[in-house]
Amino acid sequence: MSYASIGPIAVHLPEKVETNEDLQAENPQWDLSAIASKTGIHQRHIAAEDECSSDLGVAAAEKLFSEHNIDPQTIDYVLFCTQTPDYPLPTTACLIQDRLGLRTDIGAFDFNLGCSGFVYGLSIADGLIRSEAAKRILFITAETYSKFIHPTDRSLRTIFGDGAAATLIESNPQRSMRQFRFGTDGSGGDTLLVTEGGHRMESDAIKPRHRKRWPSQLYMDGPSLLSFTVGAIPKIIDEILDSANLTSDEVQYYLMHQATRKMLEQLRSACNVDEEKIPIRIQDIGNTVSCTIPILIDDMRRDGKLSAEHHNLLVGFGVGWSWACCVWQDIWLGDH
């Protein structure tokens, strides 16, 4: 039996950087110091007007191939996770296959999930590899949420950044991911949404849970998302630890979706774990939605913080509402 293993990761961020100082100069009435103390974010990368998620994803994949001497012709499948596709159709993953010059006898599809998307994608990749449908999977997460945000939106513009991560998922006889658990509660769909661009008539569309304060296409009810997350995530973590026969002390890191500093600090308290076990690395890139966990993994690998012997939990949560978690060991480090 073969299992999915997280191989090398490459990250690509847009060239444009938008700092809190830039926002303060543009909006003197905003209290960026107070906002930054809650979000933990001091700058974000913003896609150019003509730069789409596929552009970021292709750049990340090309970097992955180049830096890790990966032959693109060995890719058997493309998974593309985004909530900002280039078009309603065709499938962006198909366009990526062509732009990267990958074989035509491979599978490729998009899936629309946000902050839980990386963990969901890992479970899909694991299923493809265990069923012998693929041996090498190119898993790209890419987002351009900034295109949904109006320049005057103090709440969202200070949080979300654009970016992409390309992750190689490979077949391995050693099992590095297990105890996948998922959660879905569509009653929370009205707390983070974009209704424009779909085919549901405006008169029948989902309504924002509370008053919409800014003219952005994207609406977010931060307090409700925080309440949902702090309620759901400790429960799923307890379930996974129990099913995996692990104690919290045996977990090296809880690698969580990097939403905001406030969110992660409240989760740390709710899960009753030490501060160093839930790393926060959001300061220079903001909340990049489906990309935060692979970016975090790549960052911690570079700093030598991960090891092949230790257990970690990968935890995604957010829009939908949707959440997912699994146990993971970084066995790729043991091979390199």
Image (spheres, rainbow, N blue to C red):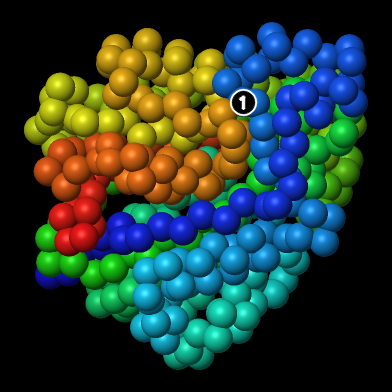
Which picture quadrant has residue 279? top left
Q: Nearer the viewer, residue 109 or 331?
A: 331
- In the depicted structure, whether residue 220 falls above or below residue 124: above
Q: Position of residue 175 (x, y in %)?
A: 15, 57
- Residue 43 left/right relative to 267: right
Which picture quadrant has residue 82? bottom right
Quadrant in the picture for the C terminus: bottom left
Q: Position of residue 102 (x, y in %)?
A: 50, 85
Q: Residues within 10 Å of mark 1 (few under 14, many from 20)?
A: many
Looking at the image, which residue sits at the far bottom? 104
- In the depicted structure, whether residue 284 falls above or below residue 9: above
Label 1 SS: loop
- In the depicted structure, whether residue 154 falls above or below residue 187: above
Residue at 39% from the left image edge and 82% from the top image edge: 71
Instruction: Identify the amino acid type marked 1.
Output: Ile
Residue 79 visible, this orientation: no
Q: Position of residue 161 (x, y in %)?
A: 66, 40
Q: Nearer the viewer, residue 266 or 47?
A: 47
Quadrant in the picture for the N terminus: bottom left
Q: Position of residue 168 (x, y in %)?
A: 38, 65
Residue indicated by mark 1: 41
Q: Nearer the viewer, residue 145 or 229?
A: 145
- Residue 150 left/right relative to 20: right
Residue 41 visible, this orientation: yes
